[in-house]
Image (cartoon, grey):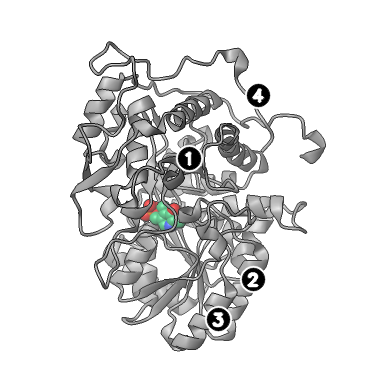
Amino acid sequence: MTDRGRRSWAEPWKIKMVEPLRMTTRSDREQAIRAAGYNTFLLRSEDVYIDLLTDSGTNAMSDRQWAAMMLGDEAYAGSANFYRLEEAARNAYGFRHLVPTHQGRGAEHLLSQICIRPGMLVPGNMYFTTTKHHQELAGGRFVDVIVDEAHDPASLHPFKGNVDLAKLERLIREAGADRVAYLSLETCVNMAGGQPCSLENIREACALCHAHGIRVFLDATRAVENAWFIREREPGYAHWSIARILREICRHADGATISAKKDCLVNIGGMLLLNDDDLAEEARNLCVVYEGLHTYGGLAGRDLEAMAVGINEMVQPEYIHARVGQVAYLADRLLEARVPIVRPVGGHGVFLVASEFLPHVRREALPAQALAAAIYIDSGVRAMERGAVSAGRDSTTGENLYPALELVRLTIPRRVYTQAHMDVVAESVIDLYENRDLITGLRFTYEPRRLRFFQARFEPEQGDTVLRWRAGEQAGDGPAPAMSTRRSDTDRVPVRHP
Ligand SMILES: *Cc1c(COP(=O)(O)O)cnc(C)c1O
């Protein structure tokens, strides 16, 4: 690729079917976000123009995947689709046993129930919301052992997802190996901004755990995107295929939980992958209780088939290049305008550093939540808070947690949006950054007990909006265009190699 460094990448597909989007005015959006309690999770999708809430289950499937849906074998037991998925998953990830689940958290639930006893510790390279919640429901306590650089949005460390081996070793020594349930090792760490782990670190973390008789389970939800970064950044792998790096990532671990709604290019599905026969037997048994029979795991046969095809497509080099390239394109446009974002840029989205973006909004006034609401009001782009609201409260003291990272995630669905959409997003964010003093804070009006970010409601601290009107503009004015027309086509920044 470097020999063609001056050439653009482009998507290795063309569009066959389109889904029209509804354009709205600023007044429509003010009303919609107020009705949603200033929580972008509570907006109706019809009121959203460009939906960057998540890359989870928002993938566009290929024509082959849609064709595969017609091959659904909807038998209750032993569906042909299960066996095809089992083969695809075994080829791609290399683990012996597949237990399908309705989505990633189903797999996390089974794994946590099987492997965690009350009072045990579960070290991991930064928490993920559902993962940690299931670990706690099983009586475990999550302990963060990610490298310090992960908490520093300005650090340019190439593998900010790495496990800090010294922290892990200290934890094992102090707690005793038999109190450690397993190492929960996430690839392309979501909450750190989609930051990868190096293969060297994965190998060493696994070796350290295995030397103490401790198992390692990957959260391999974004392992393909991680494989891309290993090829790009870690010496010695530039000529390896993505498929080979993916297998190498998994080779050292004892199993994996996977949300197939991300890398695997489907809209629903999850997997628990295991090597140990006895653990797999236990997992299949619990699967029957919570998910469905172990050959369908809460999914239709057609879903299993689409997943099998998606697993084959996800490791194609042109696909993953375009995927990560689109994220890098959006990031470059923001960096050019000096918008504070997490760097290096991760694999699945661009993370705005809300605490720097809105220095005048106190942490207690939830700057990331307010910024996500303001972006929606400005352009109909839906983003997600990843800061204090997501972090929730300490499970023992009940105090609010204020993590080092107070972020807004602009998550890019796979194969869904065009570069012009990315331009609209960049222009809105840049414009808000230049007018950031118009954005004010929020306070809770309703706080759910579990995973509060999904359903919490808020109100502006001052007045009746989080984004004040600029001088010259007025509430109630006629329709404002959903997208900016400030830039002409000719001064668009050209596509760049990621
Ligand atoms: C999405 C996600 C999960 C949970 O998967 P669901 O399919 O949403 O249940 C777990 N871990 C990571 C890193 C994720 O991004």
**Mark 4 or 2 closer to N-term?**
2
Q: CA distance from mark 4 to mark 1?
A: 37 Å
Q: Nearer the viewer, residue 99 or 144?
A: 144
Secondary structure found at label 3:
helix
* Residue 103 visible to the viewer: no
Element type at mark 1 = helix
Q: N-terminal of the two: label 4 or label 1?
A: 1
Q: Nearer the viewer, mark 2 or mark 3?
A: 3
Crowding at label 1, few (<14), some or many (≥20) Cα neighbours within 10 Å?
Answer: some
Identify residue for label 2. 203
Read off the residue under disc 3: 169
Task: For ligand 1, tell me if the residue under mark 3 lies within 8 Å.
Answer: no
- Res. 68 mark: 1
For marks 2 and 1, give the one nearer the viewer.
Answer: 2
* Numbered circle sitting on residue 494: 4
Amino acid type shown at disc 3? Glu
Earlier residue among tags 2 and 1: 1
Q: Amino acid at mark 1?
A: Ala
Quadrant of the image where one finds ligand 1: bottom left
Q: CA distance from mark 4 to mark 2?
A: 39 Å
